Image (cartoon, rainbow, N blue to C red):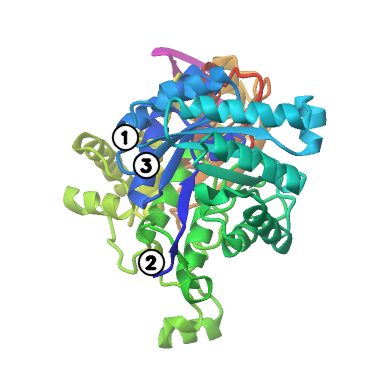
Amino acid sequence: MGERIYVFDTTLRDGEQSPGASMNAAEKLRLAIQLEKLGVDAIEAGFPAASRGDLEAVRAIASKVKRSEVVALARATKNDIDLAWEAIKEARRPRLHTFLATSDIHLKYKLNMTRDEVLRASVEAVKYAKSLTENVEFSAEDGSRSDRDFLCKVFEAVIEAGATVVNLPDTVGYAVPDEFGELIRYVLTHTPNVHKAVLSVHCHNDLGLATANTLYALKAGARQVEVTINGIGERAGNASLEEIVMALYTRKEHLGLETAINTSEIYPTSRLVSMITGIIVQPNKAVVGANAFAHEAGIHQDGVLKNALTYEIMRPEMVGLSSSQLVLGKHSGRHAFKEKLAQLGYDLTDNEVEKLFVRFKELADKRKEITDEDIEAIVAEEILRIPDVYELEYLNVVSGTVAVPTATVKLKIKGEEVQGAGFGVGPIDATFNTIAKLTGSRSRLLRFTVTAITGGMDAQGEVTVRLQENGLVALGKGADPDIITASAKAYVNGLNRLEYLKRTQARAAGTAVL
């Protein structure tokens, strides 16, 4: 048995800070339930002071999650801590997480505080949080660029004040592995009371070193990792849960460490995060990418056929990929369809399954075979989507070498039907122009991506758009065998997400980035 590492998942907080990745309350709750199923020790559910909507989402998660700790983030102020506690006080295992920057560059340019003032504020915040709950975490924002002795002094003081976890973030992804490991060792040997708390690390991926830095920190003695699913998060993202967990699992004899993660739930959780956020997992992403267990080279194929260990250091089944497939088509029944949904990691009600089954049958009448990606596209569209302000009712497009591209569109806007027509330089441009005119949207199209998510001439196409309006950025996704229809769905989905952001955007003075 290896020494236990605690997994603190911050997908719902830091991960949601990825541009365009905002989630509504229902999506957050669904993901939190899956994270508990995955076996994470702590779920950082959000930043309640950011908005009333975020507070309510954290409260809903706190009432539902039973085994994992539910964590709420708060700046080192009484008001933030009060709001965080209001959100999690009914949780079975609550944790308050407060933070303050400790690097000189943050003190001078962001906080306008002296070291003594930061020390005092940190202790006061932890003492106040401790008066509300026994379980308190303190993070030294930009810890990797802080003066080592001052960092140790702050950690000693907050532990004395009652912190049960002290977190050392590499907030801007500046550290390199041996340097970060040495910093961890320094903190452990120069903080007299560090044995009274768990030392945690939170690494960002700006230089592509988040996983390496985290592993070096664990070897040096850190015992909690703060990670996200698929490595999403601010800027280049965070250390990836799946990479850390599978590195510890696969190289247990070398690292001597283990987690309580149910590794067979890794892939379903990854797909759920991708579906909810609209952030596509790159094909060559470690552990959960589409190519992670794919072999094209003849030599590799020959080796794997003879013995999978020749080119696979992990078996697909370890992370939740099954070598067996249920082939779905128009002759498939509800039982097979429900089983496929379960295999893909979706725990749905009978009503949700029935709603999806109707859509599945409609698609099966047009397609010879339905793939996993088709099913996930239907789930994303029917179950995981945000509440609609705009609904696409009808689309007709005329285009060609001798025709002016024209789109006729009918929408429902808050339940009322509107229709119109417009022109463009192509069929998709005409469609977008018409929808924009009907909705009055002033959003700007930043990105347009088309992906064939299934193979063959009758492939299901998936369109992803990135829209920007008044500083808000949202992703929209749509899937359909007709790529123009998929584009319209994606655009409408993006407009709905923008509307959601307008209603729920955090009004706090600043955004927390650890």
- Left/right placement of residue 491 relative to residue 63 reads right
Badge 1: few (under 14), some or many (20 or more) residues near its Cα, within 10 Å?
some
Regarding mark 1 in the picture, which secondary structure is present there? loop
- Left/right placement of residue 142 relative to residue 76 reads right
User: Do the numbered discs 1 and 3 sit on residues whose CB atoms are within 8 Å?
Assistant: no
* Residue 148 can be seen in this image: yes
Q: Of discs 3 and 2, which sits in the foreground?
A: 2
* Residue 2 pos. (x, y %): 43, 68
Quadrant location, the N terminus: bottom left
The kind of secondary structure the magenta stretch mainly shows is strand
On the image, numbered disc 1 is attached to which residue?
92
Upstream in sequence: badge 2 or badge 1: 1
* Residue range (magenta): 404-420
Point 52% across, 60% down: residue: 244
Q: Of discs 2 and 1, which sits in the foreground?
A: 1
Regarding mark 3 in the picture, which secondary structure is present there? helix
* Residue 75 pos. (x, y %): 60, 27
In the image, residue 126 lies in the stretch drawn in magenta: no
* Residue 394 pos. (x, y %): 43, 25
On the image, numbered disc 2 is attached to which residue?
318
Regarding mark 2 in the picture, which secondary structure is present there? helix
On the image, numbered disc 3 is attached to which residue?
378
Of the residues shown, which amino acid type is indicated by label 1? Arg
- Dividing the picture into quadrants, the one containing residue 61 is top left
* Residue 387 can be seen in this image: no
Between the residue at mark 2 and the residue at mark 1, the CA separation in whole angstroms equals 30 Å
